[in-house]
Amino acid sequence: MAELSIGLHEAQQAVFNDPARFKVVVAGRRWGKTELARGLMVVNALSDTTWGGLDAEKEKEVWYIAPTFEQGRTNLWSRLKKGLEPLGDAVKTYENTCVVEIVGGRRIRIKGADNPDSLRGIGLAYAILDEYADMDPRTWPEIVRLALADARGGAMFIGTPKGKNHFHELFMRAEVSKDWSTFRFHSQTNPFLRRDELESVASELSSQLISQEVEANFIAHGGKYFNESDFVLDPNEPSDGVWCLAIDIAGFSTIGTHKVKDLERRDETAIAIVKCGASGWWVKEIRHGKWDPRQTAVEILLAARSVGAQKVGIEKGTNMLAVLPYLTDVMREYNRWLEVIPLTHGNKRKADRIQWALQGRMQKGRVKFNPGQYLRKLIEQAVDFPDPRSHDDLLDALAYVDQMSTTVYMDEFEGLGNTWEPLDEVAGY
């Protein structure tokens, strides 16, 4: 059989070579958790025996379990296939289900833990649980642990801390348990991650996120991500930058058998109007209201026209689809056309997405706010976040600007390489 190459850096090798049956790896972002997982999955799938020395029958599969199936597909699937290419025809892949079948009947399978009970019933030779902090706590003790029992298979937990939750409890128990090993690594222990790049990432994060996401520390969140003191007021519009409009369209609900045109708003739609430049963001205003689909379309166009924006970002989903026909009609009516960019949550929890987009920027003074009536409601939502009893429409729209600013700066001049320089920083060309 062809020879497979599994390239690991020194810290990854320490985990790979550890003989413990169960391993808990807590590591900062970009440390290389997924690459380590790929290597261990392949080795265990090709092994004739499990950790406990029993025959690794073809019925005993190797699983990579992510919080959702789509996360697992995104994180691992392409890397897994690439790593198995040297085996040629000895490997079959099934794209829709993300299954790899190796000659002899052994299988590697990507699974999602968003429905833990769907994981029951299969015997496992080995399992990897990625970002266990985002899974139902029952996933390991009630389901995966039992699936490993027959074959005396092993498992590895990998992830970045998310406060002191069940992942933290597992780590603490593992430190004093037989057959368990624990590891904790700072992001910089990955020798392939450039130090200046890591420093650049850290410069955009709050001290809390640096400790958690880079240094891999379990820290207790205070329950609030924002303080009123984080809101820096500045009535002066910066001279440079590009206008970004990000829209959070809250859901519509039908009344009886009425059609789309009679849909009624349940919460508020929010339109964040922000100028993004080298010095940070300047929030002109966030328009919000309880609008029906047509009025929402009118408000979007008026907001774009007020600052001369050419692009608007709208949260992708059924609410966007409900508004788009009206937006097309309104643009035709006013003879003004906008490029609509679908925005996504990227399989992140709302709390994580908003924290990543805003907390570090605001604490470091890289988001400034034009005084206005919108501020009272925005600050109220921010200091209450993430209380499920509070609204977050304005805060959510502002967080989506993070995707819009990336689109403007990275995609607008794609393919020009590093040789392009603007002749005019205001116009951007």
Image (cartoon, grey):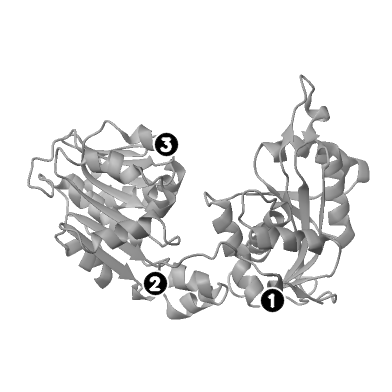
User: Tag 3's secondary structure?
Assistant: loop
Q: Which mark is first along the chain, 1 or 3?
A: 3
Q: Which mark is residue 338?
A: none
Tell me the distance, in whole angstroms, between the alpha carbons under discs 1 and 2: 26 Å
User: Residue under circle 3?
Assistant: 115
Tell me the distance, in whole angstroms, between the alpha carbons under discs 3 and 1: 43 Å
Q: Is residue 1 visible?
A: yes
Q: Is residue 196 left or right of residue 44?
A: right
User: Residue under circle 2?
Assistant: 187
Q: Nearer the viewer, mark 1 or mark 2?
A: 2
Determine the image quadrant of residue 379.
bottom right
Badge 3 crowding class, 10 Å Cα cut-off, few under 14, some 14 to 19, many 20 or more, is some
Q: Nearer the viewer, residue 91 or 359?
A: 359
- In the depicted structure, whether residue 241 falls above or below residue 266: below
Determine the image quadrant of residue 356.
bottom right
User: Residue under circle 1?
Assistant: 278
Residue 206 image offset from top left, x and y in percent: 56, 73
Indicate the quadrant containing the C terminus: top left, top right, bottom left or bottom right: bottom right
